[in-house]
Image: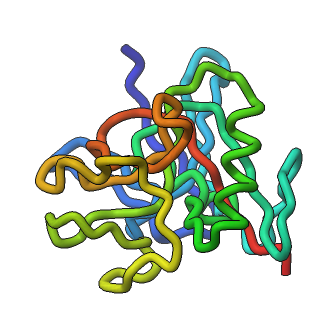
């Protein structure tokens, strides 16, 4: 194992090293975006900033939104963080038109993915899911599959699952799935 000193990050005072836990923090906000690089045999990390104006390559367009389907499998929170780092958010489907658009695309892809994370959450351990951006408010559109949600005490997150025709289902948040980022076209 190589041991070395942390190189000072230019013009950045938000990083720190904790002697108590022997950990390095690049950011104290809790939402740090990083790139991991291999340089001369060392694994290095470089802090990113969240994109203020995202550039969305290979994105789908519907009305005033752009959608990027990402096939890398992540936990729901990792998917939220990745979308945020790209200047977007994990998708919140608010209309039947939007749902049909996304369903059509997912069904046509044939990637073998078991499902895709959506940004719904069960805040109250009940059978009501809400979008993260509007906790406490009913979803304006409900695309849940028959019998879903079915486990409000353990399955708090929402995904579109392949085995129920990409209808929505509640799942444990630690499961790993591909995900869909949503960006504003404005």
> Which of the pair 46/161 is nearer the observer?
161
Q: Is residue 97 above or below residue 148?
A: below
Q: Is residue 65 left or right of residue 106?
A: right
Which residue of the protein is positioned furthest toward the front in this rendering? 146
Q: Residue at x 60, y 56 (%)?
A: 83
Q: Residue at x 84, y 51 (%)?
A: 59
Task: Locate the N terminus and report the quarter of the image it occupies.
Answer: top left
Q: Is residue 153 above or below residue 44?
A: below
> Which of the pair 92/164 is nearer the observer?
164
Q: How many marks?
A: 0
Q: How is the image coloured?
A: rainbow
> Where is residue 108 drawn, in percent x and y?
77, 32
> Where is residue 121 drawn, in percent x and y?
34, 63
> Where is residue 105 drawn, in percent x and y?
76, 42
Q: Residue at x 66, y 18 (%)?
A: 40
Task: Locate the C terminus and report the quarter of the image it occupies.
Answer: bottom right
Q: Is residue 86 left or right of residue 135?
A: right
Q: Is residue 153 left or right of residue 17?
A: left
Q: Is residue 160 left or right of residue 49?
A: left
In the rendered image, which quarter is residue 61 located in?
bottom right
Q: Residue at x 50, y 59 (%)?
A: 143
> Where is residue 68 drawn, in percent x and y?
74, 50
In the rendered image, which quarter is residue 22 located in?
top left
> Which of the pair 58/46 is nearer the observer?
58
């Amino acid at each position: 194992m190589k041991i070395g000193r942390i190189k000072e990050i230019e013009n950045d005072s938000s990083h720190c090293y904790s002697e108590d836990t022997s950990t390095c923090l690049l950011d104290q906000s809790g939402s740090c975006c990083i790139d991991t690089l291999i340089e001369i045999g060392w694994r290095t990390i470089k802090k990113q900033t969240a994109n203020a104006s995202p550039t969305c390559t290979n994105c789908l367009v519907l009305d005033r939104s752009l959608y990027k389907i990402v096939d890398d499998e992540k936990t729901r929170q990792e998917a939220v963080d990745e979308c945020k780092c790209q200047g977007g958010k994990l998708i919140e489907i608010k209309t039947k038109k939007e749902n049909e658009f996304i369903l059509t695309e997912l069904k046509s892809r044939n990637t073998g993915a078991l499902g895709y994370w959506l940004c719904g959450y069960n805040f109250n351990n009940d059978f009501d899911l809400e979008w993260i951006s509007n906790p406490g408010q009913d979803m304006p559109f409900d695309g849940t599959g028959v019998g879903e949600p079915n486990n409000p005490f353990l399955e708090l997150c929402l995904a579109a699952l392949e085995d129920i025709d990409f209808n929505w289902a509640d799942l444990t948040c630690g499961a790993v799935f591909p995900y869909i980022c949503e960006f504003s076209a404005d």
